[in-house]
Every structure is written in structure tokens, then in C-alpha cells.
Image (cartoon, rainbow, N blue to C red):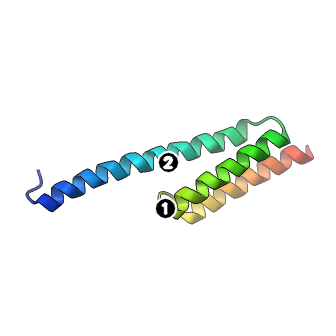
Amino acid sequence: MPNHKSAVKRIRQSERRRAYNRFQKVKAKRAMKAVREATNYEEASKALETATQVLDRIASHGVIHKNFAANKKSKLARYVNSLKNG
């Protein structure tokens, strides 16, 4: 158990931040899954736009690394472009 008031507060803050970060990661995973499950180009491109916004937002807040977000966006964009050509 913490012995200082500041340690107790730090634990409360950490729990809140952990819950927020976990929700944001789940939100990003759902957005990426929506892109992969899209069947046609129009649907996939709309889902890609949403996923890009979500990934950029959580990367800017430090929930995920910016290179991780860039990597995921690149792979999803390649998938969407393959739907356009195929």
C-alpha cells in the first residue's frame, strides 16, 4: 500500500489513464477490422478514412507510437488500393 498521498493519487490517475488507453486501442482495432472486412472499394475507403483519423489521434496522444500508426495506415491503404484494382 502507498504511504504518501501523492502515491495514492498517482495510482488513481494511472488506473484512469490505463482504462482510457485500453479503450482507445480497442477503438483502433475495430476501425482497422472494419477496413479489412469491407467488400468493395467505396466502403473500404470510407472505413480507411475513419481508421486513419483514429490512429492519428491516438498516436498524437501517445497511446501508440507514431511509427506503429504509420505502418498500420500504410498496410490498410495498400489493401484498399488492391480492392480498387482487383
Q: Identify whether 67 is placed above or below 86.
A: below
Mark 2 vs 1, N-terminal side = 2
Distance (Cα) linking label 2 and label 1:
10 Å
Q: Position of residue 80 (x, y in %)?
A: 80, 48
Task: Identify the residue position indicated by label 1 in the image.
Answer: 61
Picture residue at 71% right of the left edge, 42% below the top: 35
User: Which quarter of the picture shows residue 41?
Assistant: top right
Asked whether disc 2 touches disc 1, contact meaning CB atoms under 8 Å apart, the reply is yes
Mark carried by residue 23: none
The C terminus lies in which quarter of the figure? top right
**Does dot 1 land on a helix, a strand or a loop?**
loop
Amino acid type shown at disc 2: Gln
Amino acid type shown at disc 1: His
Q: Position of residue 75 (x, y in %)?
A: 71, 53
**Does dot 2 land on a helix, a strand or a loop?**
helix
Task: Identify the residue position indicated by label 2 in the image.
Answer: 24
